[in-house]
Image: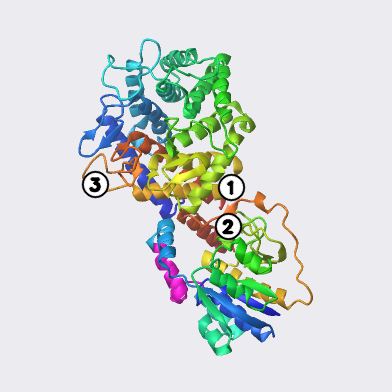
Amino acid sequence: MKVLLTAGFDRAVNVIALCELLSRDGHLITGLCIVSPFRLRRLRSLIRRRGFRAVIEAFKRMSGAGNVETEDADLIAEFRREENLRYRSLKSWCRDRGVPYLVVPGLNVPAAIDFLQNTEKDAVIYGGGGIIRKDFLQAADHWIINAHSGPLPEIRGMNACEWSVLLNLAPAVTIHYINEGIDTGPVILRLPVTVEIGDTAKSLRTRCVIEGIRGIRSVVASPGPIEAAALEDADRYRQCFMLAPVLREILERKLARLEAAG
Amino acid sequence: METTPTLDKYYRHLELTVDWISRSIDRGRGGSCGYYLPPMGWSAPYPETTGYLIPTLLSLDPFFPARDLPVQAIRLGEWLLNIQLADGSWPGGFYRSRKSARPSIFNTGQVLKGLIALYENTGESRWLESVGRGARWIIAGIDQDGLWTRKDYRARLTPSYYTEVARPLLQLWKISREDIFRRRAQGVLDAILARRQPDGTFSFWSFDERSPAFTHTIAYTLRGFMASALLLEQWDRYGKPCERALETLWRKAELRNGRLPGVFTQGWKGDYRFSCLTGNVQIALCLLTWEDRERDLRLVNGAAKLVDFVCRKQRLQSSLPGVRGGVAGSDPLWGSYLPLRYPNWAAKYHCDALRVLINRLQRELGDND
């Protein structure tokens, strides 16, 4: 299968893993659309919405420094070891493989849409880059696959695995097509994710990301057309947004209690 | 009791805001000063907000049992009894003397909330007698159209936030079982309900029919409906029509990390040059009231962000007694809603929102046991 991927930043672990693993499976990566996060407008918007601390956190995460001291570092390292992933930058992976890539300020800019239209592909895999608008969707013929870290249609939006735990739903990764709504597209596959003793919000999220990579890999590997079930009443479920600090703390308590209860 | 760092922070903000309210009462010549304006100092007492500070003080007694908040509440109530006008009403604006006092329907309604809370708290008939006279004066002014057109401070129409006048009438009906109060209150609610637009907004929910609505008066309108719906046990009739507006406000609060615009024009177009901090916490209260029915933590998340924003703007340290622990009218301070001032109703709603949020979060922590 010929696949084009999007990424939210150059060091996105999920997209690096997908590029390497899908190539190993015999699929052809025909292009990469990488969003550059360091833009004045984006920074301004981030500061306004979430404050300076969020900018520092985002910088750490995107530059790769964030994984060094966080509790999900072990999980990432283990996954990289298990799958023998060598690369840490999408650009260098593309350069080494001769895969064309484009760095854009956002996925909805004309350059990204042109790149998408002019690249041969059977499917587009969304690995990040912000909300996709109608033009990008049309350019991809609506064949954009996404791994969402929560059960759909119940948990739509951000911090999905965290919200699953807070709302007492079994955490799951949903592989689905992207449509005009927020996580309202047809569902291809739903994979359960177990909350393990010792899990924190970060480690749980990382395990969801890893499960998402495995899910997309299995979907792309399946023979024949990829079938999906439409979500009739997805809009009925309220969208999830980033957790307020106090709810993140309550989530951590909830996970810690799970550990205490054994 | 189990807590978290942010919950501890909420307790600290609550405590310092209560300190601020106590200072406004100490300087209030019997009532609570309407606002603090540096460097001018404290304003004259404001009967309307003194009235609705009373239920706030009473509800905070379990949080601060050593502070004698019910005693403060009773003193405020006694001051309100003393300044009640002969016709049963209370004056609008700041209180300077009986001679300059002009009756106000909205302000009388807000005073009633305080006196009803005192009656419920103490069981003393003096509060209820006074409430009865005030409520009768309010309903005597109601026109054929169910409102107070040409009889209040706005010449041509009754603003939609007068749903908050219907609410104390219903509270009184619940106590006295005099059906006239229910019928008149429902007449008010129905007349305002007819102003609902398809996008969930209500016409004339601002102070002035030509101006956009502050989030402060938007929240009054919605909360008046919601509280009335709960008192009447008629959510579908009076609560449900607010849900579209609440959903919109919740989304906007989430998308802006708790910073709502100060005003909305028609079609939910916001003016983000400033935020009305009172409105912010009032909307948080509306979301928490709704959540009590919906049982959806996502709404609590939005409310927490609204409260967090106001906490971030609150100065916990200042040599100025009216700034320390106070909540400004606007952010930035020179924004269009009460520029440079620290109103006592901003402090009141901040306390109310913090209290309800803390209780809800404590319950969530407890549920996890």
Is B41 left, or right, of B199 in this rendering? left
Query: Where is residue A125 shown, x and y percent of the image?
Result: 63, 72
Identify the residue at image location x=20%, y=39%: B39
| Chain holding disc 2 | A
Query: Where is residue A70 shown, x and y percent of the image?
Result: 46, 72
Ranked by sequence position, the earlier of labels 3 and 1 is 1
| Chain holding disc 3 | B
Between B74 and B275, which is closer to the camera in this rendering? B275
Is B210 included in the stretch rendered in magenta? no
Identify the residue at image location x=60%, y=43%: B294
Is B185 left, or right, of B329 in this rendering? right
Instruction: Report the span colored magenta.
Output: A53-72
Q: Residue furthest right?
A: A224
Between A70 and A110, which is closer to the camera in this rendering? A110
Give the residue number, with chain letter if any, for mark 1.
Answer: B296
Secondary structure, mark 2, is helix
Between B212 and B300, which is closer to the camera in this rendering? B212
Secondary structure, mark 3, is loop
Q: Looking at the picture, does residue B248 appear above or below residue A141?
A: above
